[in-house]
Image (spheres, helix red, strand yellow):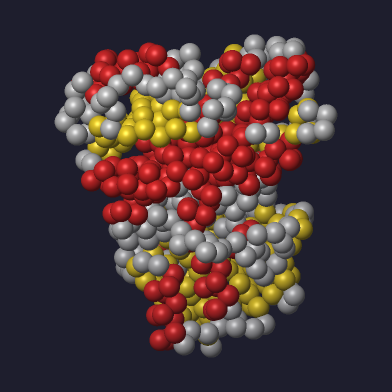
Amino acid sequence: MCGIVGIISSKEVTRRIINSLKKLEYRGYDSAGIATLVDGDINEVKCEGRVEVLEKDISKFNLKGDIGIGHVRWATHGKPSKINAHPHSSEQVSVVHNGIIENSTILKKFLEKKGYIFKSQTDTEVIAHLVTEYLKKNSLKDTIIKVLKKLHGSFALGIIFKDQSNLMIGAKRGSPLAVGYGPNENYIGSDSYALKSMTNKISYLDDGEFCIVKKDQIEFFDTAGTKVNKKVMNLSKDEIDYDKGDYKYFMEKEIDEQPSTIIACINEYVDKHNKQINIYNFPWKISSIESIMLIGCGTAFHSCLMAKYWMEQNTNLDVSVDIASEFRYRKVRFKKNCLYIVVSQSGETADTHAALALCKKNKMKTCAVVNVIESSIARDADLVLPIYCGQEVGVASTKAFIGQMLVLYILSIKISFDQKCISKKKYQDKIKNLLTLSNSTKKTLKLDQKILQIGKTFAEAKGSMFLGRGYSFPIALEGALKLKELAYVHAEGYPAGEMKHGPLALIEQGMPVVVLAPRDEYYKKTISNMQEVIARGAKVLLVTNKNKDEVISENIWEKIEVDQLDEELIPFLMTIPLQKLAFYSALEKGYDIDKPRNLAKSVTVE
């Protein structure tokens, strides 16, 4: 959540800080700010709202400086406002912070007794005053060591000093922080994407580390203040200029990019000529894996649920799924021969990263399914399976969800064949079917006009339900989540067979309900559940696949048909109408589709 950037240079930095903040907008935020050093003074400009507002305010003040820090804030302590926006400054220092200081109340009381006056309701302001207090009797390096020990919680910090215009500090615990190298200038940022327009040479701080950044030198230190050497990574220059093109919204573009996402992913993992799946550098014998635990949050959790169905269907493994924020706090009984798979679009999801760390601490086998291969989760896992979907800017995940499902499906087929659970012919048939998925996805994307009209009804509803069985149940959950995220309509996903056990009480006249009923083994039972819903006055949108047999019902409100495809792959096609339904519902209501309220793209706090 939040995003920070810092630049120290021999030339003016304000414009480039603003540009980097724009790169961080995708993370989700409610306010923004910047601070620079000019003629020995800390000058800051902050605002509630978007970076474009900050940009206009800065032009009024003619803010300059060759060292500065910037921030886009997602509120944790204190409501969104100009005074709560970062940076937070004392007379001596200015701080930007991504994370949460859990003992801020205690520290605030300590500092108030020392005479410090607080202007904001944030936890971050204590850092500025704490640094100021320790600087009275300590060197800069010792001050940072002492302050970091005092802070409980998670943080990525950028700090500049009134009396030391030749350096800035970066520090990390829990939240990610990248350090970039440039010609006679250097940078810090919440992720490499924010820095890519300036450099492709990046290092990453590990937990507990801090750095002293000068324009011609960067020094790294561990918790005790001992110097450490950092690996410098050379990043690809690809997708630096990722923009909306002819689209009005990133999400709209990213939905339409899903056929390309599928092709890119398949090209990385599937040998089309030999009809086999290649997962290189698999560090264990398949025969040594007896079970799989899939871990994720939100949309990633839904991809994990989907993978459970595939893996149980195709392998002999015991497969379980857990929400990362629950997994990390339970008394987990780790299994030696279990493969723990963590799934995260950003690779920085705090709860998922903590779950991975817990697995690593217990010496478990770990695999990461991520979109960002330079991310913390990718760096820490034993095996990384990238989804190759490219930059995803829209906060509500679309193409990354398709990518996550696809990688997990490919992995399930690979394990199944290597365990001799399926024959070579069936293995190659599955691969052959997989190669048709992109084309079927393209056809599904052409259903726009019909979904546009349907979306108006969902936009006006006070609530809705999404029902499915088997492979369709995780997709029902994801469809409901998308409607909540984008259109702010209360929506719930349920197994269709569970309706009689409580949720049916919520059905009332005119309530829109999505029923996912592909022509699979559950089809007839799902249709029976649909009739129960219709009988109680619901307006049913049936999503199914094309077939010669008609659904016997005169009371279906609307019907959407996707391509006929192998039933294991139908969930990919079913996902797309639900993404578009949420998109058009939000569009009807005039909401900010790429940046839904209260949400962040990269959830780097618990």
Of 407 and 180, which appears nearest the observer? Answer: 407
User: Where in the figure is residue 267, as x and y percent of width and height?
Assistant: 73, 40
Residue 64 visible in the snapshot: yes
Quadrant assignment for the C terminus: top left
| Quarter where residue 234 is shown | bottom right
In this rendering, position of residue 181 left or right of residue 502: right
Residue 423, image quadrant: top right
Residue visible at 43% across and 28% down?
544
Q: Residue at x 21, y 21 (%)?
A: 535
Residue 97 percent across, percent down from the top left: 48, 59
- Residue at the far left: name it: 509
Q: 397 or 189, which is in the foreground?
A: 397
Residue 329 visible to an observer of this rendering: no
In this image, 167 relative to 508: left or right? right
Residue 321, percent from left and from top:
52, 23
- Residue drawn at x 71%, y 27% is 431
Relative to 115, 367 lies left or right: right
- In the rendered view, tell whether residue 19 sits above or below residue 58: above
Question: Of all residues shown, which one is farthest toward the front?
Answer: 548
Does residue 133 appear to the left or right of 419 in the view shown? left
Q: Residue placed at 76% from the left, 29% from the top? A: 277
**How many numbered discs, if any?**
0
Residue 396 point in image, percent of width and height: 45, 47
